[in-house]
Amino acid sequence: MIAALSGAREVSTELGAVSVIAVRGAIKAASEIGADLGAVAQHATMGTIEAAQAIGGSVSQAARSAAGGAVRGTGEVGGNVSAAAGKAMEGTAQAARRLGADVTELMKQAAEGAMEAADRIGTVASRSVRTTVTHAVEGMGRSGAAGTPRTRGKAGVRRSRRRA
């Protein structure tokens, strides 16, 4: 991830675009092999934020873009976008703690990115993701730890229908 982002050091827009593409690609690859999309959303988001910090990039932009990429990629493979958003929020909180960054601020940025991506998917996705990320950010404000994302139906992100 660091190598992929190192060329985008100077331009925040490039960092954002690379972050979205990297996380979307990870989600799509996970879907192809039937892996847990939520775990990928969480760890890809966390890694993207940490990589941005390592190259001196904007961790806020990385959080926003990575969460958006997780939602967008999950939507493209027919996964549970709300659960993916929740996991991306968890990854954001974990990265912020590891980096000593402002957890609440990074979570707000990730929430914005996730909501923007969900808005492009459709009304149902938008409502669902908005509820999930709002609960996560509110939970952070109350407890100092990421709130438990609320999703409709089965918890977690369903595995892809595709099997190798």
Image: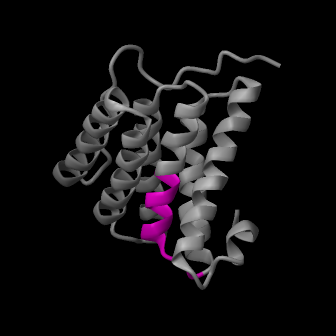
Colouring method of the image = one colour
Q: State the residue in front, 35 or 100.
A: 35
In the displayed image of the protein, which residue is found farthest to the bottom?
10
Q: State the residue in front, 51 or 112.
A: 112
Give the tally of numbered discs.
0
User: Measuring 68% from the left and 44% from the top, which residue is drawn there?
Assistant: 26
Image quarter (top left, top right, bottom left or bottom right) of the N terminus: bottom right
- In the picture provided, is 138 more to the left or to the right than 10? left
- Can you give x and y, in whole percent of width and height, for residue 7 in the image? 71, 78
**What is the span of residues highlighted in magenta in the rendered image?**
56-67
Which quadrant would residue 36 be assigned to in this image?
top right
- Can you give x and y, in whole percent of width and height, for residue 45 in the image? 54, 52
Q: Is residue 36 magenta?
A: no
Q: State the residue in front, 62 or 91.
A: 62
Image quarter (top left, top right, bottom left or bottom right) of the C terminus: top right
Q: Is residue 64 magenta?
A: yes
- Can you give x and y, in whole percent of width and height, for residue 87 in the image? 46, 40
- Can you give x and y, in whole percent of width and height, for residue 67 in the image? 47, 50
User: Measuring 58% from the left and 39% from the top, which residue is drawn there?
Assistant: 73
- In the picture provided, is 102 more to the left or to the right than 161? left
User: Measuring 64% from the left and 39% from the top, which residue is drawn there?
Assistant: 27
In the displayed image of the protein, which residue is found farthest to the right?
164
Q: State the residue in front, 38 or 9.
A: 9
- In the picture provided, is 131 more to the left or to the right than 88? left
Q: Main secondary structure of the magenta part?
A: helix
